[in-house]
């Protein structure tokens, strides 16, 4: 049944798929989506109206760009002032933690996330300069990827939230993903044997 119960499940799944670590959306974003869409998505689906999914995704993309731009700017200033003798903790599994409710809370979360990434790389005996270079590449690649999302990608995310809310073994494949799936299943590919891929920002 396409009803309020399904609408609620789709909203929860879509938000969890986009931001499982609850580190991009603010609590205010979630409250807005709750008020507007908790029991309204079913009506939108019946009208072939995809605007709610695109609105939520666009807000997610905006938040990701904000966070990544900020952390890249922080990295470009260097890591020499980062302190490692403070007793503090970072929850890695945040699926049951409330979304950050202020800019201060969000910045503190991302400060700790960056520090955790730096510490992880320090354990591999990398120098601070190497760590800075590695993390800059990593975050810039993430930023490039999020900016390359197309309407097809958003549609696939949203339709998967609907399909998986109805049946956990059902998935929607975009035309591109369908082609890849068929190639993998048939174990055959007609072509010249070349693979096109992205390495950092280059093709």
Image (tube, rainbow, N blue to C red):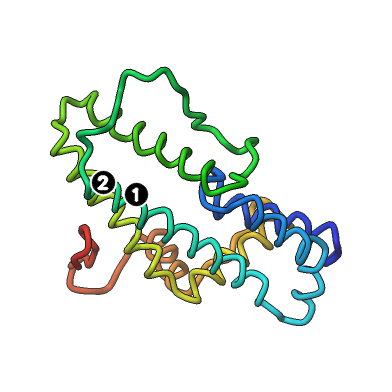
Residue 75 numbered tag: 2
* Residue depicted at 80% across the width and 59% down the height: 6
* Residue depicted at 42% across the width and 17% down the height: 87
For residue 116, side relative to residue 126 (left or right):
right
> Which part of the image, by quadrant, shows the C terminus?
bottom left
For residue 166, side relative to residue 131 (left or right):
right
Task: Residue 32: name its quadrant.
Answer: bottom right
- Secondary structure beneath disc 2? helix
Q: Residues within 10 Å of mark 2 (few under 14, many from 20)?
A: some
Percent of width and height locating residue 49: 70, 80
Q: Looking at the image, is 112 positioned above or below residue 185?
A: above
Q: Are marks 1 and 2 in contact (CB under 8 Å)?
A: yes
Of residues 162 and 154, which is closer to you in this image? Answer: 154
Percent of width and height locating residue 126: 15, 30
Task: Residue 144: name its quadrant.
Answer: bottom left
Of residues 182 and 201, which is closer to you in this image? Answer: 201
Q: Looking at the image, is 89 positioned above or below residue 140?
A: above
Residue 71 numbered tag: 1
Estimate the spatial distance between the alpha carbons at disc 1 and disc 2, rounded to whole Å. 6 Å
For residue 154, side relative to residue 66 (left or right):
right
* Residue depicted at 24% across the width and 23% down the height: 123
Percent of width and height locating residue 197: 24, 63
Q: Residues within 10 Å of mark 1 (few under 14, many from 20)?
A: many
Percent of width and height locating residue 82: 28, 31
């Amino acid at each position: 049944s396409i009803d309020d119960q399904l609408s609620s499940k789709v909203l929860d799944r879509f938000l969890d798929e986009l931001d499982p670590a609850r580190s991009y959306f603010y609590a205010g974003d979630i409250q807005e989506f709750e008020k507007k869409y908790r029991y309204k998505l079913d009506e939108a689906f019946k009208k072939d109206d995809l605007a709610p999914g695109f609105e939520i995704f666009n807000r997610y993309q905006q938040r990701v760009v904000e966070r990544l731009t900020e952390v890249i700017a922080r990295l470009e200033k260097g890591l020499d002032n980062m302190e490692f003798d403070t007793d503090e903790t970072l929850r890695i599994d945040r699926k049951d933690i409330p979304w950050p409710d202020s800019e201060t809370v969000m910045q503190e979360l991302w400060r700790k996330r960056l520090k955790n990434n730096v510490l992880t790389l320090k354990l591999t005996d990398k120098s601070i300069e190497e760590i800075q270079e590695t993390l800059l590449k990593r975050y810039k690649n993430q930023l490039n990827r999020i900016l390359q999302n197309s309407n097809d990608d958003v549609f696939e995310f949203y339709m998967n939230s609907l399909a998986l809310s109805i049946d956990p073994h059902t998935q929607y494949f975009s035309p591109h993903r369908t082609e890849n799936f068929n190639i993998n299943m048939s174990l055959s590919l007609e072509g010249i044997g070349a693979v096109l891929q992205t390495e950092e920002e280059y093709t």
